[in-house]
Image (spheres, rainbow, N blue to C red):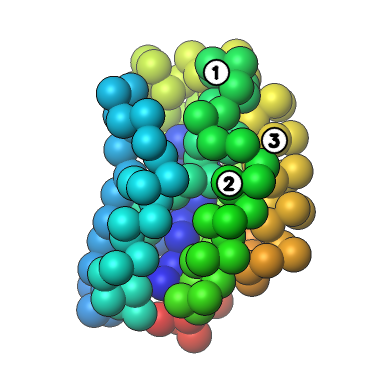
């Protein structure tokens, strides 16, 4: 299983669509304010055929966006660690996409909500993502690519071996 993570506008869905075109099944974790049992939500996916799954976002986003936008995450570090270990058991890798603030703002001009979030919180989100990814590397392989510096084809060529 692959998890594709990063800020809004970084190119997650574009990369996930590449994996789908190579035979993988896409799963997107939407934000659901009513779903308070996130552990069940994130563990349930492990019952699928994980070898062919690519996730467009995951529990990682909760650990990044939750503290920045709501003041706290709905999962704690102990739960996050349990999720990492469970996902590692099914041979999961994380693809962490990054981009400069300027790049993201240019890509999200048509979505005022994303644009404003990036404008206001980019530095905090970037720092939180980096921190969470450094922590995650102790449990799961993390591959980082900067979509401001490399184009879609270059990144696809690099991740092709993960399909």
Earlier in the chain: of badge 3 and badge 1, it is 1
Answer whether residue 159 is visible to the viewer in this image. Answer: no
Along the line of sight, the residue nearer the viewer: 21 or 88: 88
Along the line of sight, the residue nearer the viewer: 157 or 125: 125
Q: Is residue 128 left or right of residue 116?
A: right
Q: Give the residue at mark 2.
A: 79
Q: Position of residue 106 (x, y in %)?
A: 48, 30
Distance CA(mark 3)–CA(mark 1): 12 Å
Q: Is residue 17 left or right of residue 72?
A: left
Q: Is 139 located above or below residue 108 in the figure?
A: below
Q: Give the residue at mark 3.
A: 128
Q: Position of residue 8 (x, y in %)?
A: 46, 36
Earlier in the chain: of badge 2 and badge 3, it is 2
Along the line of sight, the residue nearer the viewer: 27 or 88: 88
Which residue corresponds to the image point at 58% horizontal and 56% vertical from the top-left?
Answer: 82
* Disc 2 residue crowd, few under 14, some 14–19, many 20+, Cα 10 Å: few
Distance CA(mark 1)–CA(mark 2): 20 Å
């Amino acid at each position: 299983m692959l998890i594709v993570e990063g800020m809004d506008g970084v190119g997650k869905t574009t990369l996930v669509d590449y994996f789908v075109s190579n035979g993988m099944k896409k799963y997107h974790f939407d934000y659901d304010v009513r779903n308070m049992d996130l552990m069940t939500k994130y563990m349930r996916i492990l019952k699928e055929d994980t070898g062919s799954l690519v996730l467009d976002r995951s529990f990682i986003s909760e650990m990044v966006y939750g503290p920045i936008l709501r003041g706290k995450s709905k999962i704690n570090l102990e739960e996050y660690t349990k999720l990492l270990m469970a996902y590692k058991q099914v041979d999961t890798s994380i693809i962490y996409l990054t981009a400069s603030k300027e790049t993201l703002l240019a890509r999200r001009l048509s979505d005022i909500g994303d644009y404003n979030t990036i404008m206001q919180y980019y530095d905090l989100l970037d720092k939180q993502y980096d921190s969470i990814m450094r922590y995650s590397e102790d449990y799961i392989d993390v591959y980082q690519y900067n979509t401001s510096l490399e184009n879609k084809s270059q990144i696809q060529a690099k991740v092709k071996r993960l399909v």
